[in-house]
């Protein structure tokens, strides 16, 4: 992920004193001097004395999870108001001590706030930052055709010209994400509606990380549909710096198509016909799948730049390929290599969990890294 410029926002707004008396409240002192909230969105300075802010699209705030002030530990809790109007995501890496709060986009401007309460012993102190969340700008769907994922899959099998090269929008629930676009250009995510899956590709990084999509979220996506060596993909964004070709977003409230999206179904492939030209197989492409008692045969130790690794396996007498391709990102790839380096040919058995792919040939894609392969005990 590209590093963002973070600007400190000092805690000096609308103090709501709790338990006030003549003694100095250490919680108030900590509130006045500690850095509790960071502006993570636009890199612009925010005057601490101003209590109402216009928040443009993708504005977000990093809230400190725990507080140490003058070598003393304080408890800090946050309340995001109004309830249900914020998206909270725990951060990792450099900012793992923070939770990222982003106002949920709405079609009308609304007032929102983040309230922090600091406690130590019998003392406490609270304060609040107020914001105006801007109206969310939504994609114009005039040039797009709506099509459920299941219908897209059927047309891709029976007559690709009905979908390939077309601008289509659809809905689904996120089943997996790849958040390593600063390391590899093939960022993307998988969505599913019931048993039907779709790989969404070439995500525009600034929008992806700002929206903070999570597994389980229902999203609306649109873009050009492509046939990538047998795998149906949707280009929801072009590469950064090039012309935008599509979009992804959270649906509007009360969106009937979004409400109709079924929970992703994990499909068991133990009795599966291993044939990418099989009509039933096509319906499972990019969907969550599992397979038990796979026997490891051989693999590739290291991935070269721009290349994929393949674990050759067997299920009974059927050859099965586990394709560790670069779409899953370097970290997940390295974890998989480490997890499989002690596998013994024709001895090690494992359970697979990931998605079914049709890139070049039908194969299993371990999109959850080392969690996609569980060795039999």
Image (tube, rainbow, N blue to C red):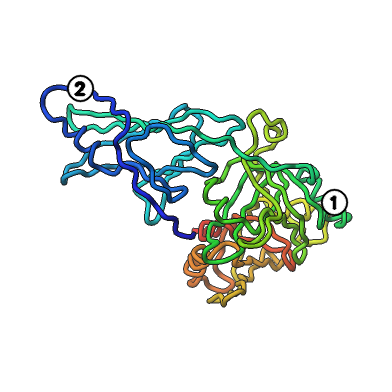
Residue 351 is tagged as: none
**To which residue does mark 2 refer?**
19
Q: Residue at x 63, y 61 (%)?
A: 365
Q: Residues within 10 Å of mark 2 (few under 14, many from 20)?
A: few
Question: Element at badge 1?
Answer: helix
Image height of 305 relative to 11, above or below: below
Is residue 376 something that shows in the picture?
A: no
Q: Nearer the viewer, mark 1 or mark 2?
A: 2
Image height of 312 relative to 173, above or below: below
Q: In the image, 188: left or right of 120?
A: right
Image height of 41 relative to 323, above or below: above
Q: In the image, 125: left or right of 51?
A: left
Which one is in front, 62 or 187? Answer: 62
Q: Residue at x 31, y 30 (%)?
A: 127
Q: Position of residue 55 (x, y in %)?
A: 49, 38
Image height of 312 relative to 105, above or below: below
Which one is in front, 350 or 86? Answer: 86
Q: Position of residue 48 (x, y in %)?
A: 33, 39
- Measure the C-alpha gap from mark 1 to mark 2: 67 Å
Q: Residue at x 59, y 29 (%)?
A: 108
**To which residue does mark 1 refer?**
155
Q: In the image, 313: left or right of 282?
A: left
Q: Position of residue 164 (x, y in %)?
A: 82, 57
Q: Position of residue 25 (x, y in %)?
A: 16, 30
Is residue 278 something that shows in the picture?
A: yes
Q: Residues within 10 Å of mark 1 (few under 14, many from 20)?
A: some
Q: In the figure, residue 211 lies in which quadrant?
A: top right
């Amino acid at each position: 992920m590209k590093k963002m410029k973070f600007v400190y926002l000092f805690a000096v707004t609308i103090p709501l004193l709790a338990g006030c008396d003549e003694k100095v409240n250490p919680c108030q002192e900590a509130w006045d001097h500690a850095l509790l909230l960071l502006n993570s969105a636009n890199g612009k300075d925010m005057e601490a004395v101003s209590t109402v802010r216009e928040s443009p699209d993708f504005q977000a705030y990093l809230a400190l999870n725990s507080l140490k002030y003058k070598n003393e530990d304080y408890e800090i809790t946050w309340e995001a108001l109004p309830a249900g109007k914020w998206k909270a995501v725990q951060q990792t890496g450099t900012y793992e001590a923070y939770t990222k709060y982003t106002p949920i986009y709405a079609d009308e401007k609304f007032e929102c706030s983040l309230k922090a309460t600091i406690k130590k012993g019998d003392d406490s102190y609270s304060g609040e930052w107020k914001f105006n969340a801007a109206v969310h700008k939504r994609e114009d769907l005039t040039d797009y055709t709506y099509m459920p994922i299941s219908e897209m899959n059927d047309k891709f099998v029976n007559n690709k010209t009905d979908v390939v090269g077309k601008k289509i929008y659809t809905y689904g629930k996120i089943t997996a994400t790849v958040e390593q676009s600063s390391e590899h250009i093939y960022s993307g995510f998988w969505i599913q509606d019931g048993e039907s899956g779709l790989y969404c590709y070439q995500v525009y990084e600034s929008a992806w990380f700002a929206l903070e999509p999570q597994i389980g979220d229902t999203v609306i996506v649109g873009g050009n549909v492509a046939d990538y060596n047998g795998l149906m993909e949707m280009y929801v964004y072009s590469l950064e710096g090039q012309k935008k070709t599509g979009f992804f977003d959270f649906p509007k409230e009360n969106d009937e198509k979004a409400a109709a999206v079924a929970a992703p179904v994990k499909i068991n492939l133990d009795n599966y016909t291993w044939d990418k030209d099989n009509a039933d197989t096509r319906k499972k492409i990019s969907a969550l799948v599992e397979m038990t008692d796979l026997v490891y045969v051989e693999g590739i130790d290291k991935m070269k730049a721009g290349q994929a690794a393949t674990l050759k396996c067997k299920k009974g007498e059927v050859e099965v390929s586990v394709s560790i391709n670069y779409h899953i990102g370097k970290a997940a790839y390295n974890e998989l290599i480490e997890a499989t380096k002690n596998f013994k040919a024709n001895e090690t058995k494992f359970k697979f969990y990931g998605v079914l792919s049709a890139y070049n040939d039908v194969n299993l894609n371990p999109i959850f890294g080392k969690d996609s392969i569980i060795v039999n005990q």
